[in-house]
Image (tube, rainbow, N blue to C red):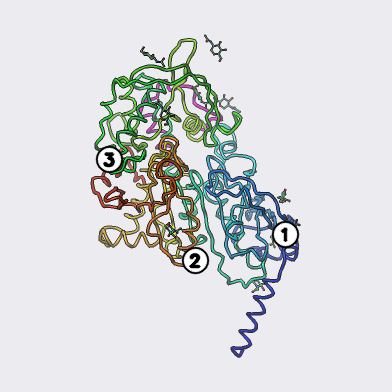
Amino acid sequence: MPQTTLIIFSALAGLSAAAKSLTDVCTVENVQAALPANNTLLGIEPIISSVTANAVVNATAGGSFMMRRSTTSETLTYCNVTVTYTHTGKDDRVVVQYAFPQPSDFQKRFYVAGGFGYSLPSSTTGGLTYGAIGAITDAGYDAFSTTYDEVNLKGNGSINWDATYMFAYQGIGEMTSLGKAMANPFYGNNNGTKVYTYFEGCSDGGRQGMSQVQRWGEEYDGVVAGAPAMRYGQQQVGHLTSVAVEHTLDHYPPPCSMAKIVNATIAACDPLDGRTDGVISRTDLCKLHFDLDTLVGESYYCAATTSSSLGFGFGKRDGIAGSSTSSTPAQNGTITAQDIAVVKGIYNGLHNLKGDRAYISWQHGSSLSSDADPTWNNETSSWELNIPSTGGEFVTKMVELIDEDNLTTLDGVTYDTLVDWMQTAMVRYLDSLQTTLPDLTPFQESGGKLLHYHGESDPSVPPASSVHYWQSVRSIMYPESSYSHEQSLQALEDWYQFYLVPGAAHCASNSLQPDGPFPEDNMNTMIDWVENGIKPTGLNATVSAGQYSGEVQKLCQWPTRPVWKNDAWKCVNDQASIDSWTYTFPAFKVPVY
Ligand SMILES: *[C@@H]1O[C@H](CO)[C@@H](O)[C@H](O)[C@H]1NC(C)=O
Ligand SMILES: *[C@@H]1O[C@H](CO)[C@@H](O)[C@H](O)[C@H]1NC(C)=O
Ligand SMILES: *[C@@H]1O[C@H](CO)[C@@H](O)[C@H](O)[C@H]1NC(C)=O
Ligand SMILES: *[C@@H]1O[C@H](CO)[C@@H](O)[C@H](O)[C@H]1NC(C)=O
Ligand SMILES: *[C@@H]1O[C@H](CO)[C@@H](O)[C@H](O)[C@H]1NC(C)=O
Ligand SMILES: *[C@@H]1O[C@H](CO)[C@@H](O)[C@H](O)[C@H]1NC(C)=O
Ligand SMILES: *[C@@H]1O[C@H](CO)[C@@H](O)[C@H](O)[C@H]1NC(C)=O
Ligand SMILES: *[C@@H]1O[C@H](CO)[C@@H](O)[C@H](O)[C@H]1NC(C)=O
Ligand SMILES: *[C@@H]1O[C@H](CO)[C@@H](O)[C@H](O)[C@H]1NC(C)=O
Ligand SMILES: *[C@@H]1O[C@H](CO)[C@@H](O)[C@H](O)[C@H]1NC(C)=O
């Protein structure tokens, strides 16, 4: 073919694609024709007769939980598509739902917004802002309206492995590969047209993102993973560490005393980074240099309250997503040595009875309230054991395999019991929920980019858990025998960057350090990296409260750490700091990545 003909031909093809309207493409027939033939995506058989398609025009956008973007004022126009597929030979049914942007808005992108708690992604429309197709899956267990913990058992002692694998990584991976296969034929684009594929999520959504990087790496171009609730066995049982410390020491500190300890720690450690701004930007310096014992004797006061707290979607059967209501009396007292002993035990992390480390804890200055606050018993006028259902339900349903929502007691439970539960869960779910595979070669070799962040004062998923995964990936993919220290850092940051967010809590800014920065714009940073080759040299984070409100900070990429010097934040190397973030887990005989 002469070259001119070719140019005219592609120009015409481009024109005809651009001229298509939503009503042209949003038909059942067009979607059916876009389905990949059986035996194209092995194991996935899309059922042609199941397809639905309807145009949604100028709909009002709903809020989206835990994503930092506000979409409330936007209106949404897209093609709402559902497809049911079956796994070859299984006769099961999996429903996937997609939002295809109208042709004039489509920017050749696919976007998955992660879920949280025990939920898979719940909104198809989060990608429309980016001109991207969005997707959700019912994972074969009605995940649109059911959480994984409601279906993980088929009965006492009997694990629902299909649901477990679908929740762990398979459901999202299949949803993405099927949706991508449909994208070009749906819009009438050439089959070879690149569809940039993104994932963004935090908490379990961060774990879900990591699951895709680990298992479906070739499908994704860019993954933004916040505070991933990964290393599932250790992470979930770890929610019981605080109550195990209280139970073992037989001391239940008044919540007000622990809140005061946290507040006083923040006040004492704030200046260690060089700037007194209400934020501990260096929790490592706090851990290394601040002595909690100095707080004994300080007084505290909290007024009586009736409060309700929102969990992270755990224990959903009890009503609204893990919420609970409690009444506490006025608390007026002074911090005791016993209170401090409990707090030190919690921050020290779980060790077995021989003293070998089993897991890591939150950084000093992180809130203790969600896992450690005891319950007030107004009959005996005392503080009592309050088992958090995050850890409690995980042990009953996923470790003991009993269909109960919470542990009822810690009688007979020692630190060794917690380590045993972690061991059981790690081994049982090693290739599903654990989500710590450290070899990311397929993702890296196909050009994938990973932006990983974690609030440094996260009170739910310890930020050192993220550090440990970064260290695992680095040591597995760039072993010291083949790479120098500098070479491995350089090679890694070309595709995997990790940032600690000073003062931030779990997937959000922190009410106890409200003047801290938070990165709001990660997807734009990621799109720039993937599509324009602009490698981030820091992560923009905006301060939204306090005397520095409006300031945009460039967060330090791990392993560098921030210090305030000559009126500016600098990112420095500090080996003592890195050492304080580095853990081994001798309580387990297999490597813990
Ligand atoms: C794949 O085969 C199943 C029957 O085994 C059929 O229901 C389905 O429509 C087929 N899908 C496609 C895309 O041909
Ligand atoms: C949707 O909104 C656009 C822009 O405001 C307007 O031009 C269009 O007529 C609206 N369409 C419908 C069906 O309401
Ligand atoms: C999308 O399609 C599904 C299946 O037909 C339907 O249940 C749902 O209500 C639709 N959503 C919108 C916003 O049209
Ligand atoms: C499952 O085990 C729990 C605890 O032993 C028991 O209360 C419950 O009745 C059992 N459920 C069934 C369906 O047997
Ligand atoms: C895309 O691939 C399908 C199946 O391989 C083929 O039938 C179709 O003609 C191709 N479309 C374009 C636009 O290349
Ligand atoms: C801790 O600080 C927070 C935020 O400033 C405040 O709301 C709370 O009352 C303080 N608690 C105690 C016990 O000092
Ligand atoms: C707390 O107790 C101290 C000492 O008993 C007392 O002086 C103070 O007034 C009390 N504060 C409140 C707010 O009740
Ligand atoms: C304890 O609290 C319950 C529920 O709030 C209330 O009904 C009861 O009267 C209280 N008992 C005492 C001794 O205050
Ligand atoms: C879990 O059970 C313990 C012990 O019965 C109880 O103290 C705690 O409040 C329960 N938690 C939830 C969220 O139900
Ligand atoms: C980060 O912030 C700086 C300064 O405000 C700005 O120039 C830059 O474009 C931002 N980068 C991204 C990726 O948003």
Q: Quadrant of the N terminus?
A: bottom right
Distance from the alpha carbon under mark 1 to that under mark 3:
63 Å
Given this view, does label 2 or label 1 mark the residue nearer the observer? 2
Q: Amino acid at mark 2?
A: Glu
Binning the other alpha carbons within 10 Å of mark 3 as few (below 14), some (14 to 19) or many (20 upward) gives many
Q: Nearer the viewer, residue 396 or 211?
A: 211
Given this view, does label 1 or label 3 mark the residue nearer the observer? 3
Binning the other alpha carbons within 10 Å of mark 1 as few (below 14), some (14 to 19) or many (20 upward) gives some
Q: Please report contact status of discs 3 and 2: CB closer than 8 Å, yes or no.
A: no
Residue with the mark numbered 2: 531
Name the spot of residue 495 as percent of width and height, x first: 40, 61
Distance from the alpha carbon under mark 3 to that under mark 2:
39 Å
> Residue at the spot x=50%, y=21% of the render?
305
Residue with the mark numbered 1: 48
The range drawn in magenta is 401-428
In the rendered structure, does residue 6 fall within the stretch colored magenta? no
Q: Residue furthest front?
A: 547
Name the spot of residue 469 as percent of width and height, x first: 37, 49
Element assignment for label 2:
helix
One can see residue 243 in this view:
yes
Q: Is residue 197 left or right of residue 55?
A: left
Res 258 quadrant in image: top left
Element assignment for label 1:
helix
